[in-house]
Amino acid sequence: MDLTPGKLRGLFGGALGVGLFLAVLGPFGSYAAPLLDRLIFWVATVLLGTGLSVLAALLLPARWRQASLPLYVLGATLVLSPVQTLGVRLLLPLIAPPDLVARFSFWDSLPQAMLLMAVGTAASILFVRFPRPQAPESAAPISPLPPLPPVAAPFFDRLPPALGRDLLCLEMEDHYLRVHTTLGNSLILLRLRDAVAELRSVPGAQVHKSWWVARAAVTGAERGKSGWELVLTDGRRVPVGRSFRAALAADGWLPQGRTVEENSHAPGVAEPPKTPSAASETTRPAS
């Protein structure tokens, strides 16, 4: 799940803009009300609906997020729209004048709540479902490796054929494992330790308790707010766990010697690491 604080600010900022736009537009017969009343009503309605949509997206089990988006939006709209309408009705006496409260009608407001809930739910689940790649300002280049031929590993028998075999990384998600390739991603029921064991013949390493990364997918290493991060070919940034740093530095993924520890206190860019030897292409997790 990739609903970061920055994305939340963007989502609610967009909701605020939509509320202001609807207040000026005055749809569903609300244009007859004074502008201030419309501002209060529409901003409260859109922000409340967005909050409910985000909550539904966060509570949704990971495997359900792979289901049909239209079906999910329809179900969430039918369930949450009455809740949103009641919430606006309870909120209005606290922020609106009595005449606006007196004009409020549950059944008149429900259709517009359903429309807003459908749009807000679709936007929220897309934010959760599809993380946006963030290109680093400056990442340390890693010596490019020649394209690797397909490797016969038992792990690939678990994947849908449409994903191909060009692995980027594996990510733990609840009790499932999300497999990222150059063609997309999919959830499979498998422990990360078992996946690492099945991928012994594939050049790569476990870099975090929840992440495994293919060596050919790494383009650089950079210091982030929480520690070292590997930058992948699709722009994804994968965290490096402290217990894995020494082994990764020894195999050329990160700077060697004291550089790893010295740079752990200040953000910066890693020096280009040495090209790993063939014997160290596959890295075992550090104990």
Image: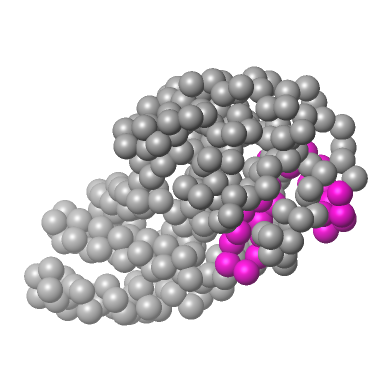
The correct choice, above or below, for 99 with respect to 140 in the image is: below
Q: Residue at x 48, y 78 (%)?
A: 79
Q: Residue at x 67, y 59 (%)?
A: 192
Relative to the observer, which residue lies in front, 20 or 173?
A: 173
Q: Is residue 101 visible to us here?
A: yes
Relative to the observer, which residue lies in front, 117 or 8?
A: 8
| Highlighted magenta segment, given as a residue range | 153-180
Quarter holding the C terminus is bottom right
Which of the 4 image quadrants contains residue 281?
Answer: top right
Visual colour scheme: one colour
Q: Residue at x 87, y 54 (%)?
A: 154
Query: Which percent across, then down, holds residue 217?
Result: 67, 34
Which of the 4 image quadrants contains residue 276?
Answer: top right
Query: Which percent across, then down, holds residue 200?
Result: 79, 48
- For residue 90, side relative to residue 266 (left or right): left
Q: Residue furthest left?
A: 97
- For residue 185, side relative to residue 128 (left or right): right
Query: Which percent across, then down, holds residue 21?
Result: 30, 47
Q: Is residue 73 inside the magenta stretch? A: no
Query: Which percent across, then down, holds residue 109?
Result: 34, 72
Query: How many circles with numbers are drawn on the protein?
Result: 0
Q: Is residue 160 visible to us here?
A: no
The correct choice, above or below, for 245 with respect to 138 in the image is: below
Relative to the observer, which residue lies in front, 239 or 180?
A: 239
